[in-house]
Each structure stands twice: as structure tokens, then as C-alpha cells.
Image: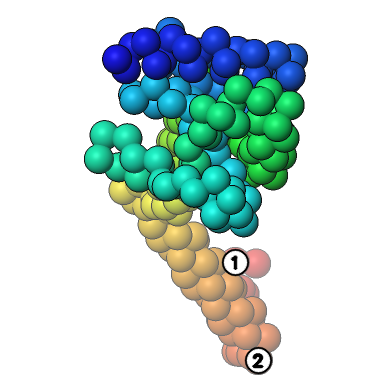
Amino acid sequence: MAEKAKSETRVLYEKLMDTQPDFRIKGKASAYTSLNGHMFSFITKEGGLAIRLSPEDQHAFQKKHRSGPVIQHNSTMRGYVHVPESLLKRTSAAAKVLQASIDHIRSLDPKPTAKSKTKADSRKKVAQKKAEKKKATKKKASKQGATKKTASKKKKSTATKQAAAKKAAGKKVSPKKTKSAASTKASKVRKAVKKKAAKKAAGAKKKASQKPGKAKTKPKKKAAAAK
């Protein structure tokens, strides 16, 4: 019974959709139409046609055609109305309801489809991988820079230590050199002492020579005898 109803409704549904060349019926087991990821019409499991409308149009339609809510698999399909067979057979009248449905769907934000979602996820993964690669490269460069800086600092420290050691070694006098210097100093002192002693002796001698003394004369007798 439902299959026969579905088949009859399908024929009328296709005739109705011919008024909208930009759209085509999708699905084989469950025929439906969609726009921007939003489904706006489909054949119910009972074999009737359901169309999605705005809240205002839905209320007016249900009041005019005495149509109740669309329930599928124990769930109320929000925004959908049952299109009576009598209305569906009048294609021109049903086309106005269909146009109102399409206008309402166009006013909604596009809903990502499974295909677009897959592409978006793929792009996101690529971007994430690029970001991770960039972060890893930056981290590696930072690490290399830190290592280079540490090496430079270590080199500088080593050079400073070597310079300090060299300076300290330059100031340090070897025992041999110290002994030689001491010997030279002692020799100079001895020479100075000798020089001073010689100078003192020379002075004393000069002073002694300048004092008046008794001249030694030979005895007269001896001088006469000699004659």
C-alpha cells in the first residue's frame, strides 16, 4: 500500500519539481530535495509529500489545509507540513507552496555537507601540519641559537681564563731569576762599600799629608866626617 502511494506521489512530485529546473530529486529509496545543505521536501514513509516552510507559512498552511505535523520514526519534523494529494495534483497551486519553501531555505545559513566538511577537515589538517612543522622548525632554530650562544659564552670564558693565567704567569718570577737579581744587588752593594771605603781612605791620606811635620835632618858631625 505504502509502496504504491510512494510511486504515485513520486510521479506528482517530479511534475511539481519540473517547475523548478534548478533543482532535481535526489535519492532512490527516499526521494528528497535540498538546498545549501538543507532538505526542504521529501516523500514520507507513508507515501505522502512533506514540504518545509517558515514558521509563519507553516501555521497558515496547516490552518488552511487542516494539516497536522509531520512525524517520521517517532520524531516530529520541525518546519514540515503534509501536502494533501488534492493540492499536489494541482501543480500550479502546489508550485506556490514549493516556491515559498525555497525562499525560506535560501534565507538560512548554508549547512556544510559531508563532502564540504571532508574538504574543510582536510584543509584544517594540512594547515595544522604546516603550523606544527613551522613550530618545530622555530623550536629547532631556537635550540641551535641557544647552543651557539652557550658555546660562544664558554669560549669567551675560556679565553678570559687563559688571559688571566697568562698575566699571572707573566708576573710570577722564577727562583733562578730572583737569585740572579739578589746576587747582582749584593755585588753592587759590595762595590759601593769598597768605593766608599777607598774614598774614605783617600780622604784620610790627603788630610794627613796636609799636616806640618818635623823634617828629618842628618847630624852635622856625620856630615863633617863625611867631608
Residue at left offset 57%, top offset 18%: 13
- Tag 2–tag 1 contact (CB < 8 Å): no
Q: Is residue 59 above or below residue 109?
A: below
Give the residue number, with chain letter if any, for mark 1. 226
The residue lying toward the viewer, choosing from 150 and 102, is: 102
* Identity, as a three-letter code, of the amino acid under mark 2: Pro
Residue 103 showing in the rendered view: yes
Q: CA distance from mark 2 to mark 1?
A: 30 Å
Q: Marks 2 and 1: which is nearer the front?
A: 2
Placement of the C terminus among the 4 image quadrants: bottom right
Q: Is residue 220 above or below residue 126?
A: below
The residue at the far front in this view is 86
Residue 155 position in % (x across, y down): 46, 38
* Identity, as a three-letter code, of the amino acid under mark 1: Ala
How many other residues sit within 10 Å of disc 2, few (<14), some (14-19) or many (≥20)? few
Residue at left offset 52%, top offset 27%: 85
Answer with left or right where residue 25 lies relative to residue 5.
Answer: right
Asked which secondary structure carries label 2, the reply is loop
Give the residue number, with chain letter if any, for mark 2. 212
Asked which secondary structure carries label 1, the reply is helix
Residue 204 position in % (x across, y down): 56, 81
Placement of the N terminus among the 4 image quadrants: top left
